[in-house]
């Protein structure tokens, strides 16, 4: 798979294109990718066409709407299915927002991608003021010689809902904010993940026998509620069980900014400056302030034991 960001020199031939924001690459997105791959012929290439920033951020929507399941950096860590040839990151800006549906199809999909097949969700909208839809694509397809596959939405029933609902990035964000990681992961088809550079922290964890790796929480990243989670952490290609605290460390410094601290089991290496991938599986408890470091240490031991038992059951 090749990532393309040089739009000026973009020129492909005979492409099967799936279009979307693809914030999180959830199960609905996976259906689009799988469909594109299934339609591939020997002289065709498959293309995921998305944007370099969240459209909600450019439009200026509320903070939670503009926050993403995957940051720009994390999206580059994603492993796409075999059979995807290109991921095109198109700049989303005021000029892009002003393009009519017809201009977008002609100038981008036809002239640059030489599109032969388009795969989208049945509710797909595009162009200025979202005035284009699947019907628009099908009409333009007659003119420019491409076909359109409009896929039905994938559904899922979250734990606090009495009926199945359509999987969407908006729904997944709502469940992340509730701390329902098990629902989130089923809708994503993979664990909710945070990727970041391991930073030099205050090493407070070492003083109570639980050293941690530390991340800054990116402003653009949507995160679950403050608390402790059962996680798995990948460093240098190796996977470890772990617990992760999201929050402000109220016992030690009650910091103003949220950070992410992970205690990795059976790991005692200097990893500062390395990239780590933390995968969230289960909410364990809310963050709270303890009367002493000793009380905190006892609670962390209980949290670690709960995570170990959780992963034992998960791996059966």
Image (cartoon, rainbow, N blue to C red):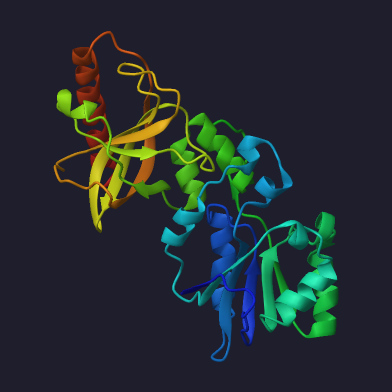
Compared with residue 111, is residue 281 higher up or lower down, i.e. above or below?
Answer: above
Q: Nearer the viewer, residue 3 or 20?
A: 3
Q: Say left or right for 250 vs 234.
A: right
Where residue 155 sits: x, y (%)?
Answer: 61, 49
Corner quadrant of residue 139:
bottom right
Decide if residue 229 is on the left or right side of residue 7. left
Name the foreground residue: 163 vs 304.
Answer: 304
Q: Is residue 267 left or right of residue 10?
A: left
Q: Quadrant of residue 126?
A: bottom right
Q: Residue at x 51, y 42 (%)?
A: 221
Is 198 rendered above or below residue 285?
Answer: below
**Residue 279 pos. (x, y %):** 36, 45
Estimate the x, y position of residue 228 in percent, counting from the top left: 35, 28
Please tell me which residue lies in front, 130 or 54. 54
Residue at 60% from the left image edge and 33% from the top image edge = 161
Residue 157 visible within the image: no
């Amino acid at each position: 798979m090749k990532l393309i960001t040089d739009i000026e020199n973009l020129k492909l031939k005979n492409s099967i294109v799936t279009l979307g924001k693809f914030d999180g690459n959830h199960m609905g997105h996976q259906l689009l990718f799988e469909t594109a791959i299934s339609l591939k012929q020997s002289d065709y290439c498959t293309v995921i066409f998305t944007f370099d920033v969240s459209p909600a951020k450019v439009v200026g929507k509320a903070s939670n709407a503009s926050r993403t399941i995957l940051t720009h950096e994390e999206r580059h860590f994603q492993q796409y299915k075999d059979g995807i040839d290109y991921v095109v990151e198109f700049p989303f800006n005021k000029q892009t927002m002003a393009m009519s549906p017809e201009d977008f199809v002609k100038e981008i999909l036809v002239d640059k991608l030489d599109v032969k097949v388009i795969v989208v969700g049945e509710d797909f909208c595009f162009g200025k003021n979202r005035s284009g839809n699947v019907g628009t694509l099908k009409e333009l397809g007659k003119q420019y010689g491409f076909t359109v596959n409009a896929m039905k939405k994938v559904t899922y029933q979250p734990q606090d809902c009495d009926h199945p609902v359509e999987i969407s990035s908006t729904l997944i964000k709502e469940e992340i904010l509730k701390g329902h990681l098990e629902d989130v992961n089923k809708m994503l088809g993979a664990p909710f993940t945070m990727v970041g550079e391991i930073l030099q922290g205050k090493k407070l964890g070492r003083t109570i026998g639980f050293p941690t790796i530390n991340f800054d929480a990116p402003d653009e990243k949507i995160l679950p509620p403050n608390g402790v989670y059962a996680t798995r952490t990948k460093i240098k290609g190796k996977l470890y069980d772990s617990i992760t605290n999201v929050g402000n460390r109220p016992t030690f410094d009650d910091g103003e900014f949220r950070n992410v601290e992970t205690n990795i089991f059976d790991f005692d290496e200097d990893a500062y400056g390395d990239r780590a991938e933390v995968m969230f599986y289960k909410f364990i408890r809310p963050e709270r302030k303890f009367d002493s470091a000793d009380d905190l240490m006892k609670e962390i031991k209980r949290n670690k034991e709960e995570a170990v038992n959780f992963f034992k059951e998960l791996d059966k």
